[in-house]
Image (cartoon, helix red, strand yellow):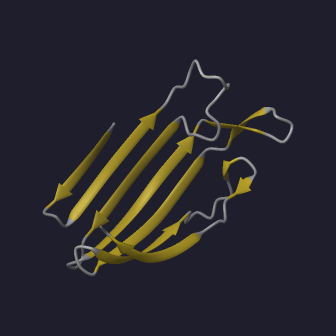
Amino acid sequence: IGARYLLADKYEAGIDCRYFKYYQGSAAYPWNLPGLNVKADIGCKPFKGVMIRGYAQILSDMHSLDYANKVISLKTICDLGLNGEYSINTRAGVFLQVSNLLNEHYQQWAGYDSYGINIYGGFRLKF
């Protein structure tokens, strides 16, 4: 279930909640997939072509196998982040994103630790 509120094409806010209950599979769990995924965001367009957003996301009820092939429950993840995008035109833009602002150390996939705060950017082309 989700909802999004837009105000005058300048402000927006949204929330998306997904709950999955898996059953009758060949494995005990769908490994590393969250049973609960909640994401909320808020954004604004301070200037033409510029969009800035902040978000919070919670991922929980994830399971995996450890090195001895035993089922383990992974820690609940709380991720806060910011991103910004500048649209050069309708088909091109540049972006910058900062994730894991709380510098949490977690594993979304067993055996693969998070990097802490992540900063990345790039160039987007739309076809």
Camera-nearest residue between 126 and 110: 126
Is 78 left or right of 27, judged from the image as shown? Answer: left
User: Which residue is pictured at 54% across the width and 34% down the height?
Assistant: 35
Residue 19 place in picture, x, y as percent: 46, 33
Residue 18 place in picture, x, y as percent: 43, 37
Is 84 left or right of 37, judged from the image as shown? Answer: left
Camera-nearest residue between 40 and 118: 118
Residue 116 place in picture, x, y as percent: 65, 65
Camera-nearest residue between 120 and 45: 120
User: Which residue reaches farthest left?
Assistant: 8
Depicted 41 relative to depicted 61: above or below: below
User: Which residue is pictured at 55% across the width and 66% down the height?
Assistant: 101
Depicted 17 relative to depicted 107: above or below: above
Residue 51 place in picture, x, y as percent: 30, 71
Say how many tags the image has. Answer: 0
User: Which residue is pictured at 40% across the width and 40% down the height?
Assistant: 17
User: Which residue is pictured at 54% across the width and 25% down the height?
Assistant: 22
